Image (cartoon, rainbow, N blue to C red):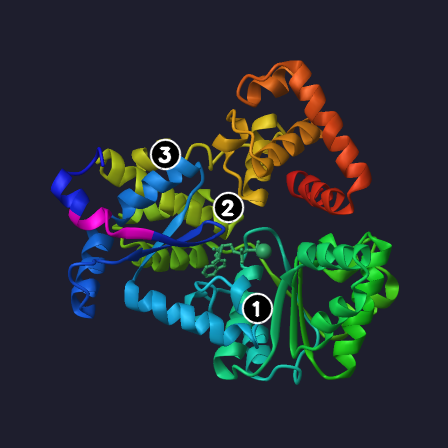
Amino acid sequence: QHDIPDVSFKTWIVPIQPYSVDGDNITLVYCNKKDQSSSSADLGISYIEKKYLSLLEATTSEVLNRICHLRLISDAEKKKEETRKTSNSSNNIAIQNLNPAYVFDTFVIGNNNNLAHAASLAVAETPGQVYNPLFIYGGVGLGKTHLMQAIAHYIIDNDPSKKVLYVTSETFTNELIESVKTNKNSEFRNKYRNIDVLLIDDIQFIIGKESTQEEFFHTFNALYQDGKQIVISSDRPPKEMETLSDRLRTRFESGLPVDIQIPTYETKMAIINKKAETLKIDLPNDVKDYVATNIKSSIRELEGALTKLSAFSRLSHTPMTVEFAETTLKDLISPDSKKEITPEYIIQIVSEHTHVSADDIISKKRSAGIAYARQIVMYLCREMTSAPLQAIGSALGGRDHTTVIHGISKMQEEVANNPQTKETVDILIKKINPD
Ligand code: ADP
Ligand code: MG
């Protein structure tokens, strides 16, 4: 409202309403009450996209303290999505967990990922018939989740009667724990066995726990024997998963293990070009080259860099130059790639994982979700850094050390008594310090 003329604000921004949030992807609906013809809605949307979307994106990202992607749809499209959701929900539990942007069309093929891409497409075309299980492995931010969800989308789009279930291994574990606690194991088994395709993301978080491995082994066998497709992703190949039981390792290796490697310069350039096109930003070649050369190991970071550049340049009306890129991206492009574990870094990872913004974590707010995330931060700072209580308190918006002690002991109790919290904390520890 501060940044644009009043009349523009009333005309273009006021009619926009929030619709859904999925991680960093936020969908907004533009509904102009006065004129509901679809052509004028489309016109309005394309105008807003051109003129205000980056401003909205930048402002949202600033407020939430993380890079967000906004998508604007019309009222008519919203209704369509709603009916699609309800008609799918009976068959497809997966669709609700899927990011609509993660499809084959938006996946750029390079020589770092062409094998994984080809295998994924083959599996999507003929589920259960070619590579089973398909095991995709590779480092963080290289496209594993994107490929898995592309498989899910493809199968559902081609045959809506197919039951496809995409879950993270954290969800699998938490649902298993919950089912044991509430004596609903048969429900759990029903859910995971009465399906045609099971995609489990980040399997490395399941291994290392006897009971979850055991249950997963049974789920795997039941589906496999019925010729159902299984797709698994992991941050490393089966043979490097130390705590994986031998019989699961054999199963994982029996299908097709494919890896995604760090992208080459050419692949990074291709992704930058595609992304610049969707973000509708003009990037001079030397800036593209700067980003492709300096962002080394993650496509997620590459995307983050582009969003940040586009948002900051429009917001500050600064032309897109290499100097501008250098200053804007200096946090992303650090000379020493090994991240030091600091309270700030822990706050960032906990924020990403719990979807509680960093601002809320360090704020005075006391609502349950925020307080929980904050206590996890306190606990992890104690466990993973040598920061004194005072430093932990000041990283958390200037809390005194008694508050920190209180938070830590509450969380210690939670971790000891609540297996779900223990699970979440374990995953966070691995995310913060993967080695
Ligand atoms: P991972 O699961 O391996 O950590 P993701 O699948 O979440 O990585 O990918 C991180 C981001 O990079 C996603 O936004 C994804 O769309 C994007 N991405 C990764 N690989 C590609 C690719 N080949 N083409 C286009 N986008 C990609
Ligand atoms: Mg992933």
* Identity, as a three-letter code, of the amino acid under mark 3: Thr
- Ranked by sequence position, the earlier of labels 1 and 3 is 1
* Identity, as a three-letter code, of the amino acid under mark 2: Lys
* Identity, as a three-letter code, of the amino acid under mark 1: Ala
Please identify, in this view, whether the residue under mark 2 or under mark 3 is nearer the observer: 3
Q: Looking at the image, in which quadrant does ligand 2 appear?
A: bottom right
Label 3 C-beta lies within 8 Å of the nearest ligand 1 atom: no
Disc 3 marks which residue?
328
Q: Are marks 1 and 3 in contact (CB under 8 Å)?
A: no
Disc 2 marks which residue?
296
Name the foreground residue: 35 vs 3: 35
> Does the image show residue 388?
no
| Dot 1 crowding, Cα within 10 Å, few <14, some 14–19, many 20+ | many
| Dot 2 crowding, Cα within 10 Å, few <14, some 14–19, many 20+ | some
Element type at mark 2 = loop
Whether residue 111 is situated above or below residue 325 in the rendered picture? below
- Ranked by sequence position, the earlier of labels 2 and 3 is 2
Q: Point out the image quarter for the N terminus.
A: top left
Apparent side of residue 18 relative to residue 223 in the rendered image (left or right): left
Element type at mark 3 = helix
Q: Is residue 15 magenta?
A: yes
Label 1 C-beta lies within 8 Å of the nearest ligand 2 atom: no
Q: Which residues are magenta?
A: 11-17
